[in-house]
Every structure is written in structure tokens, then in C-alpha cells.
Image (cartoon, grey):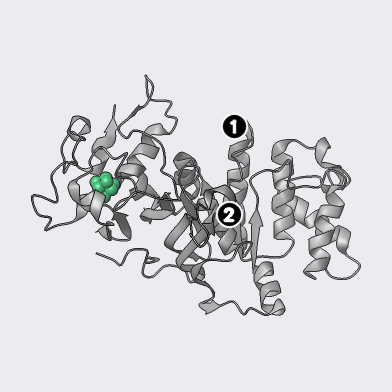
Amino acid sequence: MTPHGQAGAPAGAAPVLLEARQLTKHYHVHGRRRSRPGSRLAVHAVERVSLALPADGVTAVVGESGSGKSTLARMLARLVPPTSGQILLDGREVPASAKGRREYTRDVQMVLQDPFSSLNPVHDVRYHLTRPLIVHGTAPRGSLDEAIADLLTRVALTPPAGFIDKYPHELSGGQRQRVAIARALAARPRILLADEPVSMLDVSIRLGVLNLLADLRSQNHLAILYITHDIASARYLADTIMVMYAGQRVEYGPAARVTDEPAHPYTSLLLNAAPDPGRAGPPVLAARGAPPSLVSPPSGCRFHPRCPHAMAVCAERVPPEIEVSAGHASACWLHATGLTAAESRPLAGRAGDLVSSRAAPDQGKET
Ligand code: SF4
């Protein structure tokens, strides 16, 4: 059993560049929902999440909308301050000074989800790439055009002369996202935070952008955080997958292990919901309902109102993160030993949903 929220980087792996330790983000609710003066209603967007991004590796964070994955990326990009927890770059906390923040921003760049709004429609590609080259001082004097051409070549927008003077509206969605990635690369980052980089693109061009990220990882030894709701693309691109539910990390491990042998019922739900060309009928989802309110999240395991395997203990106590195989951990009471008969009885009113109260998590994969 590992402490809940421990980063869990595998031994012998590449050095960790960026690390989050027990990151928490609460947004306090203002206005009408703040019922009484002094009341402290808060959205518990992220709770005690830890993560390690190794050099030359892709780590995917997977979850539904509202799972906290984008908030996590924004904290790592230092766009929003964490409520508590630490962010370490090369094992050290980032100095609060302007210089420290500037150096952090150069090392850690973010690619946003929407390539249609992340580029300014009144400026051409040259402008979008010139600014970061100048701001971060990463182009030698007098060779801006060469540096821009190099960036465009790295994101496979070739020949560069065919793109450098184009405006965003003259580019396809995939080409815009490539310009956004080139803009991030202009700072010569070591870490790329990609927040749903393909979710707004046509299916036919998603693969090209995913392959570009894979090439950049191997050619530039980048550490990439890939945020997605699509667990199939996470398996395709990532070495490691972290699954988040309602602001918490619920499963973590090697991508193939997490997707082949899911150890948390929520991961099974995501896998069942993923498109599968080999499946004849519609997916059969074991879990019911929708993600909970993060203002007053469920007690115990936050997934228990939806979980087909929920037991009495699940509604009362937060499950610890339990290692199910090397480097693969799940925060689920199904893997705990020593539960009493009372703790492991099916949750009241849930017996009709259950196959077995102690069924293996991937029994949720009904076909
Ligand atoms: Fe949560 Fe319990 Fe279901 Fe595991 S079995 S996911 S702890 S509700």
C-alpha cells in the first residue's frame, strides 16, 4: 500500500523534470451560492494529486469533464496558484521572484485545447512565432526568419514559406494546432503541457498531431503531459496513465497495464465508453449517473454513488492508494485486505447493480 497521492515514479526511470506533490485547488464560491456571510463554500477542483513527469516520457491524465485534469495542468503551468501542495522543477521549488517565474515559463510551456481561439486572428504565423522567440531570447539576433522556418519544419508545416505569412483563418484546425505547438517550442521548453490538444480537431487529423507529439518527445527529449478524456488516445501516446475522478487521482500506472488490466471501476467505465470498432453493439456501462458536485463531493470514495461494486466502507472512508502490481496503483477498497464483513457488505440499495460485492474491477467490462 502506498500513501494516497504519492507520485509513484518507477524506479530506474528517466530523471523526473517536473513533479507535483499533493497539489490541491479549491475555488471559493462567491455570489448567491455563498449562503451566509462567513460561509466558505468551495469547489474542490483538485485534491492532493501527485504526479511526476520524467524526461523523454509522455504521461497522460485521463478523466471526464470536471475531473480536475485541466485545473491540474493550469497549476503546473502556473496559470493558477495551488491552494496547497508543491511544484518542483528539477527537484527544487520554483522561486517566487520574477526571474524564477520567467525561467519556469521558458522550461514549461502549455498547448491549449482550442486552436481556433488560441491564435490571434489579426496576426499572421510570423507574428505568433516571432513574439516568443524575442520574449524568451531563443533566436540569435538577425536570424528570426531562420528560427521561424526551423520551428515550422519541426511541426511539419513545410515548406515553411507556404505558411509563414498565413493568417489563422487560412489554416485548417490541424495546421493551427501545429502553429500553437511551434509557438510553445519557440521557448525551447523541456516540458510540454498539452491540454486536450486534439479534442477539437477532426478525427482524421488527430492522429497526425498525436504522432507529432510523439516525434517531439523522442527528438527533443521533452517531458509531455497529455490531458485527455479519451483513454484510447492516452494508451496510444503515453507511457504512463493517471486516471482522475472528481478531482482525485484514482489509478496510476504503465499505460498498457492500466488499459489492459484496469484496477479501478472508474477506469473500466472509461474503457467501456471508448469507441471500439470491434464491438458490435453499443457499449454497456456498468456504472450509472453523472460526476458529483465538487462543492459537496460524496463522502468516502467519491465514485461510490456510481460504482456497481460499492461496499459499506466505500461510503464512509476514503480508499487508500493500493499497489496492485509494480508501479500500478488504484485507490479502491476492492484491493484492500482485512475488511470486516460489515465493511465489505454491498452498499444499501445497490445490490441490484452488483455482480458481486468483491468482484474484480474489470468485471465492469460487460460485453
Ligand atoms: Fe470506490 Fe468502493 Fe467502487 Fe472501489 S469499490 S471504486 S472504493 S465505491
Question: Of residues 267 and 139, which is closer to you in this image?
Answer: 267
Q: Nearer the viewer, mark 1 or mark 2?
A: 2
Across and down, in percent, residue 210 comes to 58, 44
The residue depicted at 14 percent of the width and 51 percent of the height is 343
Would you say 289 lies left or right of 307 here? right
Count of numbered badges drawn on the protein? 2
The residue depicted at 79 percent of the width and 37 percent of the height is 171
Give the amino acid at mark 2. Answer: His
Q: Identify the element where label 1 is drawn.
A: helix
The residues bearing labels 1 and 2 have C-alpha atoms spaced at a distance of 39 Å
Q: Identify the element where label 2 is drawn.
A: loop
Crowding at dot 2, Cα within 10 Å, few <14 / some 14-19 / many 20+, comes out as few
Across and down, in percent, residue 180 comes to 72, 50
Across and down, in percent, residue 47 comes to 43, 60
Crowding at dot 1, Cα within 10 Å, few <14 / some 14-19 / many 20+, comes out as few
Across and down, in percent, residue 262 comes to 31, 45
Q: What quarter of the picture does the C terminus occupy? A: top left
Give the amino acid at mark 1. Answer: Val
Would you say 251 lies left or right of 324 here? right
Q: Earlier in the sequence, mark 1 or mark 2?
A: 2
Residue underneath mark 1: 203
Question: Of residues 89 and 70, which is closer to you in this image?
Answer: 70
Residue underneath mark 2: 30
- Find the residue positioned furthest to the front: 37
Would you say 126 lies left or right of 280 here? right
Residue 137 drawn above or below residue 171 = below
| Residue 222 visible, this orientation | no
Residue 354 drawn above or below residue 77 = above
The residue depicted at 35 percent of the width and 37 percent of the height is 269
